[in-house]
Amino acid sequence: MIDIPNILEFLEFFDFLRGSIAAYIILVTASVIFIVRDWRWSVLALAVQYLVVGLLFSDVLDPQLAFMKVVVGLFICLIIYFTARQVNWGQLPADVTDDEAVQLREERLLRFGPYMLPTDTPFRIFFALMVILAVWILSQRPVFQLPIVPDHFNLAVFALVGLGLVNLSFTSEPLKAGMGLLTFLAGFELFYSGLEQSVLMLAFLAAANLMVALVVSYLTQARHAYQALLD
Amino acid sequence: MSSPLLVLLAPPILAIIVFFLRRWPRVAGLSSALLLFVLALILARVDLDLSGQTVAGGLIRGNTWMLLGREIALTGAIRTILLFAYGVMIIIFLLATLLPQGYIFIPLSLAVLSPLAGALMVRPLVFGAVLLLVAAGLLALMIQGERAGSTLASFRYLTMVAIAAPLLLIAGWILETEQAPLMGSVATLYVVAFAILLAGFPFQIWVAPVVSESQPLVPAVIFGVAQMMIIAFCLLLLLGSPAVQRSAQFWQVVRVSGTIALVLAGLFSLTARSLGRLLGYLILIDIGIVVLAFSFLDRTRPELILTLLIARVVGLVLAGMGYGFIRYQLGPDFSTLDLGGSLRRLAWIAPVGLILFVYGGLSLVGLPLTVGFRGHWMTVDLASTQSFWIAAIIVLSMAAGVITLLRLLANSLGQDSRISKAHKELTTEMKWAAGLVLGAAIFLAVYPQPIVDLAQRMILLI
């Protein structure tokens, strides 16, 4: 019989990722969600982000509750993954031509040596670097130290909130902006879980996150429906 | 079953039942109105003074419910607010039988009553901020409806509430745990969160898109029922925060936010090009006045805000109905309607819809002989004792709204238009419903005492 490790054994296995390393990984995943245009990479980064945020949750919450946070996060990723697949990862469906589609056009690309990148990628990289710099400086300043939570939470919370909000403001595409909103909420939850550990609040926050994911999914479908593409 | 459990569970269960009837709009509208009426009757019979008393045929027992270690309590004030919300919803559902609003409108309208009620009942109250986010999710779906294409309005609304909720939670934690070094930031957190939830400046950007992108009766739910419960939530939060009540800066910033929102709403209304946008800006004028009335809470009693909100519901139902009738009659021509040229014969093509729209709009800006008059002029009166300029801005914004509506009326009386006749005529039922709603609104405009009494009753209970 397969011996499935329990939550504590999982945590022990990923012990090397806890603390500041987790905060750095979050900085990378939140940046990937913001910069990369390919939804497949964004969804993958969101899933990794929820796993790593789960590790940080285990520093302030009971491991079982932290595990529930990870499960909710992975459910959200599943919802977003299936939605993205249903709308062909944001690309035009095979049977709709560029001329027929009014809302979605093929994005303009720039050549960088052997690579072709969307034209707004350099701006996104620039803004991401600016936010990372701001987040880094803020997280080191004692005056911006978040109360109650461990020190390494500072960088993670600021990164999630900052990059989430920037992502949200950069696009009107519901799926990409939705991932920004979920990133922002994950940052807030990480901070708030240090302040309030009531099970009811945990349940409410899980319900709110799932609701946001469902709305993002519904709006993505509405935005990419055939009728909308051709209208 | 305890009464809070009934209030939380019954609406979603009714929503599921009605969802299966969605293909028959009349049946869905009538059955949801009937079911909600029964729920309202049961709720009205609950004895709130005797906890544990068995009422409603032995079904309802007690007024508090423990959920995961926290209390959820139904009080007299919350019950009155809920009964008012149920009453408005019943009227909206009956109107939806005449003007179908899409398959998901009625189920979502029922379902959203549960998190909104939960937000008012949960203890500590600040936990309700998360339930407001859940409600915002359902309302965002309602704004989108079955429409494909732009998702701007629904996503903006969801985003705004998602940003406000964390601010309230953090402020609530600071107050609850009495974090002395952070006490100074509570007023700032509250003022930003309230400005977002009340749609004050600069967070009013979602209002006009919501109206122009959604079905005609959706604004009545969002800016009427939901907004009333959100404002009740904000009032209850303020009552529990004496430190914020004492902060002069808090009231000052809310005042500035409301004043700028009013200025923008007045200017935008003069430049509106479509009926949907115009209605959005008229609602924004009303919102600006409510935010200003909210900012005078340190000097007056809160029934003024509730009077304004009840009047807003009436104005929204009228204007939404008129907007829906015009859409119904013009059919595919509605999308080409602009306030400049193509609506020149509107008064002859869709007179009933136009009358309802204009009268509802005038009520939203608070003209005499409309339901909105009393609350709006009380706010002007109150503002004039504080600052001449704020009072002048309120009057000028209201005047801008009135001018735009009168210009609309004058333009629609013309004869030269490429839209020459209606695609569909209103049914007799629609005309009867229009007459009934208009008659009730005129009655309340002439005898506003029931509105004032209801507002006072709610405040006394709070």
Image (cartoon, coloured by chain):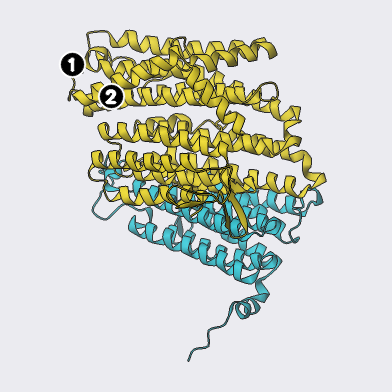
Q: Position of residue B436 (x, y in %)?
A: 31, 21
Disc 2: which residue: B433
Nearest to viewer (mark 2 / mark 1)? 2
Residue in view at x 52 percent, y 67 percent = A71
Chain letter of disc 1 in the image:
B
Nearer to me, B17 or B346: B17
Q: Secondary structure at mark 1?
A: loop
* The label number, if any, that marks residue B420 in the structure image: 1
Q: Position of residue B117 (x, y in %)?
A: 51, 44
Residue in view at x 48 percent, y 12 percent = B400
Q: Is residue B345 left or right of residue B45?
A: left
Nearer to me, B92 or B426: B92
Q: Position of residue B388 (x, y in %)?
A: 66, 9
Chain letter of disc 2 in the image:
B
How many C-alpha atoms fall within 10 Å of the one at disc 1: few (<14), some, or many (≥20)? some
Residue in view at x 69 percent, y 27 percent = B251
The chain letter corresponding to cyan is A
